[in-house]
Image (cartoon, helix red, strand yellow):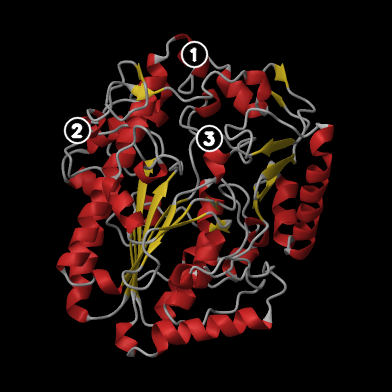
Amino acid sequence: MRRIKQITPLKRSLSALLSATLLVATLVNAAPAEKKPNVLLFFSDQHQAACLGIEGHPDVITPNLDKLAAGGVRFTRAYCNDAICAPSRMSLMSGLYPRTLGCLDNGDKTSMMDKVIPLAQAFKSAGYVTAAFGKRHTARGVDAGWDIQRSHLDDESPDGGSYVQWINEQGFGREFAEDWAAEFGRGAKGSLFFDTKIPSAKMGTRPSKLPEDKTMEAFTAQETIKLIKAQKTNGQPFFCWSSFYRPHQPYTPLPRYLAMYDTSKWGKGTRARDGIRKPPSLAEPAKALPPELAERRLSQNGIWCLELATQDEQLYRDYLGAYYALVTEIDHHLGQIMSALEAEGLLENTIIIYTSDHGDFVGNHGLIEKSATGHNVYEDTLRVPLIISWKGKTKAGLATDDLTQLADLYPTLMQLCGIVAPKQPAGRDGTSLAALLIKDEPLGREYIVSENWSQTTIVGKRFKFGRMNDTDKTIGKRNFTGFGDMMFDRQNDPLELTNIVASPEYASEKAKLQKQLAQWEEQVPGEARKEVYLRH
C-alpha cells in the first residue's frame, strides 16, 4: 500500500490536494444537498485510552463503545495536543495547535482566539443546526456558532437551562452538591448549596446518591436524544457536541455501575470480577517522577493523599472502581443515544465520533487524575480514545496505529461532509483523516507534538521525547531543581518506567527527535504562545 508523505502545516502536496478533491466528490457531491450527513461528536473528559474493553482492558466494561469500534475505525495512537482541558478542546474545535492559539493552560486568552472560525461556526454557515450539550470549556471566539448550548455549568449556558439549574429544579440539588463537594468542598457555582461547606472525600471518591436519570451524564444523553427527535422532523442536518463531564473527578459513580467492579481486593485481571487488576506501575518510586507529580505522590493531606493510599491500597481500589464505573455509565448513555438515532432512521447518515480531551493516570505511576505540570509526556494522559464510524462509508473494524491528533478532526469532518473548510488566520494545523477512514490510506506521519506551558513532547513511532520547559522548580518543602528532560522507548518500555534521556545507547534517537521538534517549532506559528508563556 502506498505511504503518503507527511503533510506539514506549511506544505501540502498537489497530489494530496487532488486526492482530497476526488474523495469529497465520491462521498458527498454526488448526493443531494439535503443528504449531507449529520455529525454526532461524543466527547468525554479525562478518559484514558486504555480503559476500553476493545483495547483489551481486563476490567472495564464498554459494550457500546466496543460495538461502535467494530463498525468503524479505531485509532490506537491518537493523541491530544495538550493534556489540559481547555487547550485540548480548543485545539479540536479550531483545528489549530495550542501554540498557534496561544492557549497552553486553562484560562489562557489571546486575540488569536477571536480570529479563528470554530468548527460549530463552519457547520452553521453550511446550513447545519449546531448544538452543544454538557461541558464545553472553550473560550472566546472558539466557542462561537452554537444554535443551542446547554452546559453542565451555569457560565456556559448563556440562555439558561444548565444542568446545575435543572438539577436544582428537579429537587436533587443537595445530592448533586455532595457529588461536587467530593472534590471542591461545596456545591457548584449556581447551586443552591454553593455557599454551603460540605466535606470533601479522599481521592475525590464516593458513591453518588442521585437517581440514575439525574446525573450529569444522563442530562447530556437526554438533551442529545431530544435534538435527534426534533431533527428527524425538520430534515436539517445537525452537528451535535454531546459532551460528558466524566470520568473526570469528582469520582462519584452511581451504585449500579460501581457494583460491576469488585474493589475489595486485587484480582488477576481475567474479567472474572474477582477483584480489579492492580495497575502494573502503581509502586513506581516518587523520585522517578517530574516535580509536581512527585509532590502529589508524597502527599498525606487533602484530597489527593497518595502517600496514604500507598499505605492503605483500598483507597486506590475505591478510586479505580469509581473511575471504571463512570466510564461504564457513559458507555450506557452512548448506547441509548445510538439506539435513538437508529429508531429515528438517522443512523446510516450520521458520522459518529468518540474521543476525549486527555487521559487520566488511573493508578499508573502511583498517580490518579493528572497534574498541571509534568504530566504532558506520559501515554496515560496524552493518548486518547478515538473512534470514527459512518455506516457504509468508513472501514468497519479497522484499527490503525497511524499517529493522529485531535486537531485532525476539524479538517476531517469538513472533508467528509463536503464543506469547504474556512480559511483560518494562521493556516491549518490539523490534517484530514478522510482518506484513511474511507480507503484505509495511511497518513505516514513520523511524529506528533503535544505541548503545554510546562512540557513539550514529541511522540514518534517508537520513541518519545519530553522537554521540560520549567526546570527550576521548588514545590512545597521539596526542591526538584534540574529534574531535566524525559525520553521513553515505547517498544521495550511500554509502562514508561525508564527515562533513557541520558543513555548513550539512544543518543542518535534523541538527537533525531530534538531536530524534528525544532523543525516543528520553526514551522508552526508561535507568536500567541510567546505572549502566554511570558505570563507563566
Can you give x and y, in whole percent of width and height, for residue 533 in the image?
A: 72, 49
Q: Are marks 2 and 1 in contact (CB under 8 Å)?
A: no
Can you give x and y, in whole percent of width and height, for residue 268 in the image?
A: 37, 22
Identify which residue is drawn at 32% across, 61% down: 71
Identify which residue is drawn at 48% across, 77% down: 415
Q: Residues within 10 Å of mark 2 (few under 14, many from 20)?
A: few
Residue designated by label 3: 370
Residue 410 visible in the current orientation: yes
Q: Is residue 408 left or right of residue 271?
A: right
Marks 2/1: CA–CA distance? 28 Å
Outermost residue on the front side: it is 1
Q: Quick one: 327 or 180, which is closer to the camera?
A: 327
Looking at marks 2 and 3 on the same chain, the residue that comes earlier in the sequence is marked by 2
Above-or-below relation of 267 to 50: above
Q: Amino acid at mark 3?
A: Lys
Q: Amino acid at mark 2?
A: Arg
Q: Quick one: 147 or 517, which is closer to the camera?
A: 517
Marks 1/3: CA–CA distance? 17 Å
Q: Secondary structure at mark 3?
A: loop
The disc placed on residue 256 is 2
Identify which residue is drawn at 22% across, 65% down: 341
Residue designated by label 1: 310
Q: Is residue 450 left or right of residue 74?
A: right
Q: Secondary structure at mark 2?
A: helix
Q: Amino acid at mark 1?
A: Thr
Q: Is residue 278 left or right of residue 378?
A: left
Can you give x and y, in whole percent of width and height, for residue 240 in the image?
A: 34, 65
For the N terminus, which image quadrant?
Answer: bottom right
Looking at marks 2 and 1 on the same chain, the residue that comes earlier in the sequence is marked by 2
Q: Quick one: 250 or 7, which is closer to the camera?
A: 7
